[in-house]
């Protein structure tokens, strides 16, 4: 009997589905402007909101692609963005990959030397830049001579930009109304490029494909992750240059969720007003942002009742944050874990349904349950997989359809990959339901007397003190024990909490040998370019003798 299905390996048949139907960002663009054409993106400029429907955005994307083609952009070329979260950034997200080029999101909080390195490494031919940010980028790239065109969003001054300078709106107005998109038959084609923030060594480029981006967007729509859907209004507080704003621009346009773009206004007050005014249902950002909002909410009681989920990740989420929002404001802050290399969705910490509230609270404190389609394991120092017993602790490795397989043009990063798995540098245990409990990043872990002390756990406990605003614990070299914990603590202004009080507070809450030997009160914990505690900077201060504390051990 004739059959269309060819046998593959012994005894198996190939399926007869349209498996070569490409998963592309062009599909998301088409769906955004048709099925989801009435959904809106609202951009905040400090005073008011500018709104556009996804249908209007789609029309502008056509013009953007036409304009970029006129400037000579070819498939595969890198087109960078240097913008806060706003409508034009969404247009770049949808348009640049759809025309076959590569969207490169530049992190505007990086130092000039890092920006210079990245622009040169990526060979960005065009940069779309917000006018107010010109002074940040111009000095970094002026001498490189790599960027041929700057497209400036807004009417502000453009001094210092070299190459040809255009105004975004003028280019769009002059561009043809429609654009003939190339067919992207192979969905493994590169779509976007994002560099890790380079906390160790030079930044490394993660090159996302169309397929990985679409699958990741779908992953975000599952109820067990963030459940993004057409009834949502999503506020990505996480910048679009930080791990693709966690994929929210794509999952929102795919489903028809409205987007609210906060621009550079990431302080508690404007965020609270946006949430109240726009009836935001999903607001996502790093813990620092939500710690500020929690303090603001405790004092001013804004109406945050529209929020159904507040995804929070990028760094360990302190207990005070999770429980403060839940208990005092009835809000569901959900911890998530991921990296630039994982697109970034890797794990989400919803509590299981079959445990009591006390146990649920502990599950929410974990980095999360490994997300569907992502594969995780922990390995020992020899790279051997370890048990999922919730006890054994090793380095987390991940693989899956939206996990990086190597870095862009960077063989020095090869040691981050192991047998087809990405090595994360995070140290964790995993339980039998796939919940990951991160104790540290391997470079932050404190090795004392041959045992490991979790800086994350110590920080969590310290931040539970009512007068502590921020706490970061680092290793201090110690002759006897190799390393001992040193706690850098920010206390509420006017509070008289000192080292002695902190030591007394921790006593009994953690093992005696975990208690920090020293406490340093500092005005603020330094932050990285994506708003995380910068322990590398603290370690440098310690080394230069700048951090001197008081002994906490009163015994
Ligand atoms: P960078 O490595 O420059 O900080 P990423 O933003 O990609 O850039 O950071 C990824 C890292 O952030 C992870 O490897 C992990 O150490 C940390 N991280 C992310 N989410 C969490 C979380 N929920 N708990 C603990 N650590 C987290």
Image (cartoon, rainbow, N blue to C red):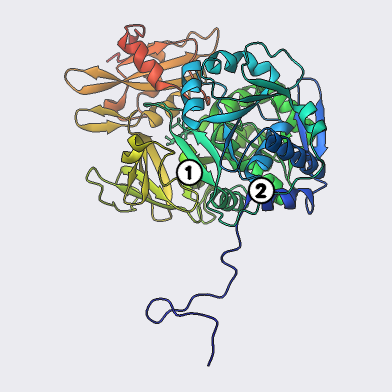
Q: At x 71% / y 51%, what residue is drawn? A: 255
Q: At x 32% / y 8%, what residue is drawn? A: 544
Question: Is label 1 in a helix, a strand or a loop?
Answer: helix
Check contact, mark 1 vs mark 2: CB within 8 A. no
Q: Quick one: label 2, few (<14), some, or many (20+) residues within 10 Å?
A: many
Q: Is residue 339 visible?
A: no
Q: Quadrant of the C terminus?
A: top left
Q: Position of residue 517 (x, y in %)?
A: 29, 17
How far, Cα to Cα, is label 1 from label 2?
Answer: 19 Å
Residue 23 vs residue 388, the one in the foreground: 23
Query: Mark 1 or mark 2: which is in front?
Result: 1
Q: Quadrant of residue 502?
A: top left
Q: Horizontally, is 401 left or right of 23 in the view?
A: left
Q: Quick one: label 1, few (<14), some, or many (20+) residues within 10 Å?
A: many
Label 1: which residue? 342
Q: Position of residue 165 (x, y in %)?
A: 69, 20
Circle on res. 228: 2
Residue 320 vs residue 141, the one in the foreground: 141
């Amino acid at each position: 009997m004739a059959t269309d299905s060819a046998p593959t390996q012994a005894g198996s048949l190939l399926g007869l589905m349209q498996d070569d139907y490409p998963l592309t960002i062009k599909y998301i663009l088409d769906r955004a402007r048709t099925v989801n054409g009435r959904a809106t993106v609202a951009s905040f400029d400090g005073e008011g909101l500018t709104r556009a429907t996804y249908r209007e955005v789609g029309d502008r994307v056509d013009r953007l692609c036409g304009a970029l083609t006129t400037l000579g952009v070819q498939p595969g070329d890198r087109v960078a963005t240097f913008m806060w979260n706003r409508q034009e950034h969404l247009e770049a997200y949808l348009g640049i990959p759809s025309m076959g080029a590569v969207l490169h999101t530049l992190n505007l909080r990086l130092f000039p030397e890092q920006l210079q390195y990245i622009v040169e490494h990526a060979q960005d031919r065009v940069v779309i830049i917000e006018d107010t940010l010109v002074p940040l980028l111009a000095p970094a790239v002026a001498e490189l001579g790599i960027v041929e065109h700057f497209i400036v969003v807004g009417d502000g001054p453009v001094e210092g930009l070299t190459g040809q300078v255009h105004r975004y709106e003028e280019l769009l107005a002059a561009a043809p109304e429609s654009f003939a998109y190339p067919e992207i038959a192979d969905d493994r084609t590169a779509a976007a490029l994002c560099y890790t923030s380079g906390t160790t060594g030079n930044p490394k480029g993660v090159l996302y494909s169309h397929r990985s981006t679409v699958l990741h967007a779908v992953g975000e729509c599952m109820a067990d992750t963030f459940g993004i859907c057409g009834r949502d209004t999503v506020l990505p507080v996480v910048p679009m240059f930080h791990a693709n704003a966690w994929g929210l621009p794509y999952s929102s346009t795919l489903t028809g969720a409205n987007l609210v773009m906060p621009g550079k206004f990431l302080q508690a007050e404007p965020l609270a007003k946006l949430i109240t005014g726009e009836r935001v249902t999903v607001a996502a950002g790093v813990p620092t942002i939500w710690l500020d909002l929690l303090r603001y909410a405790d004092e001013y009681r804004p109406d945050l009742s529209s929020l159904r989920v507040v995804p929070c990740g990028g760094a360990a989420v302190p207990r005070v944050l999770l429980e403060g929002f839940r208990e005092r404001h009835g809000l569901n802050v959900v911890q998530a874990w991921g990296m630039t290399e994982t697109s970034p969705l890797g794990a989400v910490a919803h509590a299981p349904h079959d445990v009591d509230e006390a146990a649920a609270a502990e599950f929410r404190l974990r980095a999360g349950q490994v997300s569907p389609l992502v594969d995780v394991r922990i390995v020992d120092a020899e790279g051997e997989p370890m048990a999922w017993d919730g006890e054994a602790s090793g380095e987390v490795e991940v693989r899956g359809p939206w996990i990086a397989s190597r870095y862009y043009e960077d063989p020095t990063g090869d040691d981050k990959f192991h047998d087809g798995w990405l090595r994360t540098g995070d140290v964790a245990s995993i339980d039998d339901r796939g919940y990951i409990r991160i104790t540290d990043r391997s470079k932050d872990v404190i090795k004392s007397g041959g045992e490991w002390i979790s800086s994350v756990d110590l920080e969590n406990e310290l931040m539970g003190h009512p007068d502590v605003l921020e706490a970061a614990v680092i290793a201090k070299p110690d002759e006897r024990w190799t390393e001992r914990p040193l706690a850098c603590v920010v206390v509420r202004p006017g509070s008289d909490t000192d080292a002695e009080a902190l030591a007394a507070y921790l006593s009994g809450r953690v093992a005696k040998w975990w208690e920090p030997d020293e406490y340093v009160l500092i005005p603020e914990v330094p932050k990285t370019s994506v708003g995380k505690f910068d322990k590398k900077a603290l370690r440098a201060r310690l080394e230069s003798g700048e951090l001197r504390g008081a002994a906490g051990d009163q015994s």
